[in-house]
Structures are given as structure tokens and as C-alpha cells.
Amino acid sequence: MKSFKELIDLANAEIDSITTEDLAKEINENNVVVIDVQSKDAVEEAGMIPGAIHAERGMLEFYADQSEGNPFKKSELDPNKKIVVYCGVGGQGALSAKTLKDMGFKNVSNLKGGVKAWKNSGQKTTKVSSVKPGDTVTGKI
């Protein structure tokens, strides 16, 4: 049986990571989609990176499946764009990035250190008082 740490280490070995500095440079590009996979409670506490889409980890596969007729599909999760996933500190983001890669997304990265590293690097988040899965936090940084 594998521990969660082992699963995260395995995921990190198979995915790409992006630093807060690199994401800050790329975030406003049209081909970049940022996905927050934190729980609703965590998002309400930490805020979200401006422009991110909330896709809680437990529903990520449903939102990412771009099959016609999928009632959960989020068209913003375009497999032809660069997808950057983040969570609180990186573990759920790594697992989520691996899941998207396994689903066939080609250009997926995990934000190294998650929203905590984002905020510690001086970047801003947008406070969200009532987030629903799939919500997009508007605004550019």
C-alpha cells in the first residue's frame, strides 16, 4: 500500500512544475488556464489567483472530460491550452496535474508550492466569499 506522500512523489516525477515567478509572467496570456483544485472552504480562506477557475479536486475529472453531452464539462479546461493547476501547498495540485495528464491533456503543470507560495512571493489573490465549483475569479494581475 502506498502512502499519500508516495503518491505525490510519483505524480511529481511525471508532471511539470511551474514557479510563481513564471506563472506571474504567463498568467495573462490567452493560452493559459489556471485551475484551483482546493476545497470550497480552503478557497474561501486563502482566496484564489485572479482569473483562476475553481474545479475542486473531487470533481476535476468530470469538469475536464470534454466529451459531447457531458453535463459537468467546463469548456474552459481546453486540452489545447496550457493548464496550470494549484492547491494550497502543492500536493493536491500534483495529483490533479497527473490526472489531467492521464486524461490526455498535453501541457499541464503544477504551481510549485501552491497558493501559499504565490502569496509569499508577493502576488495577490482575490477573496471569495461564496465560491461554487466551476466559478472563475475575474480580473487580471
Image (cartoon, helix red, strand yellow):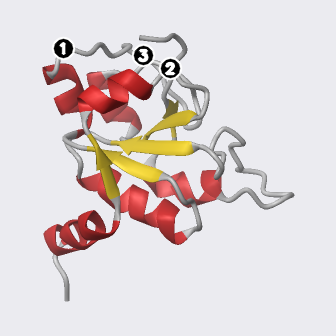
Mark-to-mark CA distance, 2 and 3: 24 Å
Left or right of residue 54, residue 7 in this image: left
* Residue that label 2 marks: 28
Is residue 86 visible in this depiction of the protein? Answer: yes
- Label 2's element? loop
**In the current view of this chain or complex, which residue is farthest to the bottom?**
1
The relative height of residue 64 versus residue 3 in the rendered view (above or below) is: above
Mark 2 or 1: the one toward you:
2
Q: Residue at x 25, y 63 (%)?
A: 12
Q: Amino acid at mark 1?
A: Gly
Residue 115 sits in which quadrant?
top left
* Residue that label 3 marks: 129
Left or right of residue 47, residue 80 in this image: right
Q: Earlier in the sequence, mark 2 or mark 1?
A: 2
* Residue that label 1 marks: 122
Mark 1 or 3: the one toward you:
1
Q: Earlier in the sequence, mark 1 or mark 3?
A: 1
The relative height of residue 38 versus residue 136 in the rendered view (above or below) is: below
Instruction: Between residue 70 and residue 94, name the one nearer to us.
Output: 94
Q: Amino acid at mark 2?
A: Asn
Give the percent coordinates (x, y) of residue 139: 51, 10
Q: Residue at x 51, y 60 (%)?
A: 100
Is residue 48 visible in this depiction of the protein? Answer: no
Give the percent coordinates (x, y) of residue 118: 23, 26
Q: Earlier in the sequence, mark 2 or mark 3?
A: 2
